[in-house]
Amino acid sequence: MSGSPYAPHTATETAEMLEAVGVADEEALFDIPEDVAFDGEFGIEPRTEREIRAECARLFARNDDLVEFLGRGHYSHYVPSVVDHLADRAEFITSYTQYQPEITQGFLQALFEYQSLLVELTGLPVANCSMYDAATALAEAATLADRVRSTSGDVVLIPEHLREGKRGVLENYCAGADLTVESYPMDDGNADVDALADRVGEDVVMVYAENPTVRGCIEERLAEIGEVAAEADALFTLGSDVVALSVLEEPASVGADVVVGEAGALGLPAAYGMGLGVFACKDDYLRQVPGRLVGASEDAEGTRAYTLTLQTREQHIRKERATSNICTNQAWVALRAAIHAATLGPDGLVELAHDCVRDAEALAADLDALSGVAAPVHDRHHLREFAVRTDQPAAAIAGDLEAEGFAVHVIGEHLIEVCVTDLNADRTDALVEAFEEVL
């Protein structure tokens, strides 16, 4: 528009363009209903900073003050203050995408270290640093499978127990790629491998499993699932998170072709919406990885240097050759995860995961001792979370617990799911007391 520094058209040029498209003015290019068109007034009264802060405080005070024992893919762990202090430095917080390596070596090195962390945890040689969340990472794995699998097939097999939102994102992606999503049954919280083997055939392009499962169960037959997928030439994709991977079977050792999941368990508070997706894979799929990769090279003087490389998204190459349309950059979130992991160190990360096992086991035992409660429902090892069976309707129990100040998931008519981490472990005794009260 005329006068704009980003579109410096003269009045004459604007008139020529309008004439070329056959309209009288710029407004004619848009069809905005009058009831939503801007009338020149925002309707927001001007206030001082102090007044705005007071108003925000009043609004936030209306939120329920609940102790959350919620999980199912979103996990809260204590984030050390050093993460905020370092990640909020101006050179990080003002950066978008590190397109100019000559001025972003520090950030690129941090992202390279984040990728290296994923490589070490998964055992797979390639990891990227720019996935939205676990759900979209899973969906990207499905479209990758469709591109790389040598034989025909259009079915993506997923566990019967999969978070509804994650399945919805996967189905949305698959609809555009002409793929079909089907589920295989579970056996006491884990994959029914025999039923899976009976189902897998030439029409299956990818088999997906989770460890731990959405109910917190440790999957015990991962290698067999990998063999089932390999025999059908289907891509084996494994879902997990960066804390769990520090103590569970290495995905590469059980035949995983791709690993997806959440890295936001480190560096981020649980926002129940914002995440950081994990995506790691075998070398064979290097040029099919969505998003961005940071590579290490040398500058003209032989000094090690870092740069974005193999960017296969549609902004950088021809649209028909792009692997994805990932646009928003998760680099700052990945930076936070890397700082958190480095602060914990290998031993600290493992100890955190061990606490998630021990605390879940102890809480399940305490709940199981209550009359009218059975925990855990599944006779498995658990990490962080587990299912609880209640004689009374689960929704009523959860509602009464909420009135007592605790939030849990309702996953069935008589099933509740409880998740314990280092942030709520000190409130487990109070949760047990509340359970006993509402029962």
Image (cartoon, grey):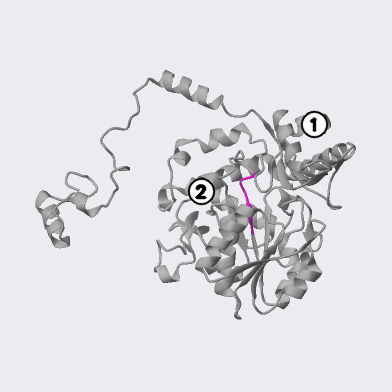
Q: Nearer the viewer, mark 2 or mark 1?
A: 1
Q: Which residue is mark 1?
A: 438
Rounded to the nearest angstrom, the CA distance separating label 2 from label 1 is: 45 Å
> What secondary structure is found at the residue carrying circle 1?
helix
In this rendering, the answer to whether 79 lies above or below 199 is above
Q: Position of residue 370 (x, y in %)?
A: 88, 36
What amino acid does circle 1 point to? Val
Q: Residues within 10 Å of mark 2 (few under 14, many from 20)?
A: many
Where is residue 8? Give x, y as percent.
18, 49
Question: Where, quadrant-wise, is the C terminus in this rendering?
Answer: top right
* Residue 331 badge: 2
Q: Is residue 1 left or right of residue 141?
A: left
**Left or right of residue 292: residue 408:** right
Image position of 107 (left or right of 220): left
Image quadrant assignment for residue 375: top right
Residue occupying image coordinates x 34% and y 24%: 45
Q: Name the kind of residue labelled 2 in the image.
A: Ala
Looking at the image, is 45 positioned above or below residue 199?
above
Q: Relative to the observer, which residue lies in front, 79 or 298? A: 79
Q: Position of residue 247 (x, y in %)?
A: 77, 51
User: Magenta includes 417?
Assistant: no
Which mark sits nearer the N-terminus, 2 or 1? 2
User: Image height check: is 289 above or below 337?
Assistant: below
Judge whether residue 263 is colored magenta.
Answer: yes
Magenta span of residues: 260-265
Residue at 50% of width from left, 35% of height from top?
A: 88
Estimate how packed mark 1 is, as few (under 14), some (14 to 19) or many (20 or more) residues with alpha carbons within 10 Å: some
Picture quarter containing residue 255?
bottom right
* Position of residue 417 measured from the top left corner of the image (x, y, whole percent): 75, 44
Q: Which mark, residue 132?
A: none
* Residue occupying image coordinates x 58% and y 60%: 170
**Res. 126 in view:** no
